């Protein structure tokens, strides 16, 4: 169960990772962390988390994102969120994580930051 990722022409250090429909932590969090580590080892400097498919996210899913951000910061890698659905955006605002993450309306806008 891998996360789909996409690179951008002309932006060798930028990659996006698409999160599946449910971000509930648990085993998925471990797989997500593994994917981020693979991308870190591949020398990407900006990782965009594409949330466009997410229909359900709980506090463990938020923890998964925060954990990824924290880990990547240690390596001077930026992580941003893109295409955040309204329900997830409300959750980010409720928890004030919208002030922690850089959030973009589209993956393409995040890639050109």
Image (spheres, rainbow, N blue to C red):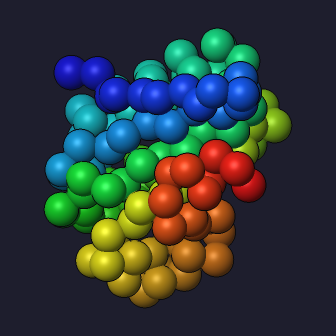
* Spot occupied by residue 6 in the image (x, y as percentages of width and height): 47, 29
Nearest the eye: 97 or 78? 78
- Residue at 49 percent of width and 59 percent of height: 106
* Spot occupied by residue 84 in the image (x, y as percentages of width and height): 40, 66
Nearest the eye: 109 or 87? 109
- Residue at 47 percent of width and 84 percent of height: 93
Query: Quadrant of the image for the C terminus?
Result: bottom right
Which residue reaches farthest front?
9
In screen coordinates, is 113 left or right of 23? Answer: right
In the depicted structure, whether residue 4 falls above or below residue 95:
above
- Residue at 24 percent of width and 33 percent of height: 27
* Spot occupied by residue 44 in the image (x, y as percentages of width and height): 69, 25
Toward which corner of the image does residue 68 lie, by quadrant? top right
Nearest the eye: 60 or 44? 44
In the depicted structure, whether residue 35 falls above or below residue 92:
above
Toward which corner of the image does residue 59 lie, by quadrant? bottom left
In the depicted structure, whether residue 19 falls above or below residue 100:
above
Nearest the eye: 20 or 107? 107
In screen coordinates, is 39 left or right of 13? Answer: left
Is residue 60 in sight in this rendering? no
- Residue at 25 percent of width and 62 percent of height: 57
* Spot occupied by residue 1 in the image (x, y as percentages of width and height): 21, 21
């Amino acid at each position: 169960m891998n996360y789909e990722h996409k690179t951008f022409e002309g932006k060798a250090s930028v990659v996006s990772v698409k999160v599946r429909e449910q971000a509930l932590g648990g085993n998925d969090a471990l797989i997500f962390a593994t994917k981020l580590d693979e991308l870190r080892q591949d020398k990407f400097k900006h990782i965009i988390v594409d949330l466009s498919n997410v229909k359900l996210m709980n506090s463990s899913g938020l923890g998964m994102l925060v954990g990824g951000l924290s880990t990547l910061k240690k390596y001077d890698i930026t992580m941003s969120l893109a295409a955040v659905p309204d329900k997830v955006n409300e959750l980010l605002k409720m928890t004030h994580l919208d002030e922690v993450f850089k959030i973009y309306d589209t993956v393409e806008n995040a890639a050109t930051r």
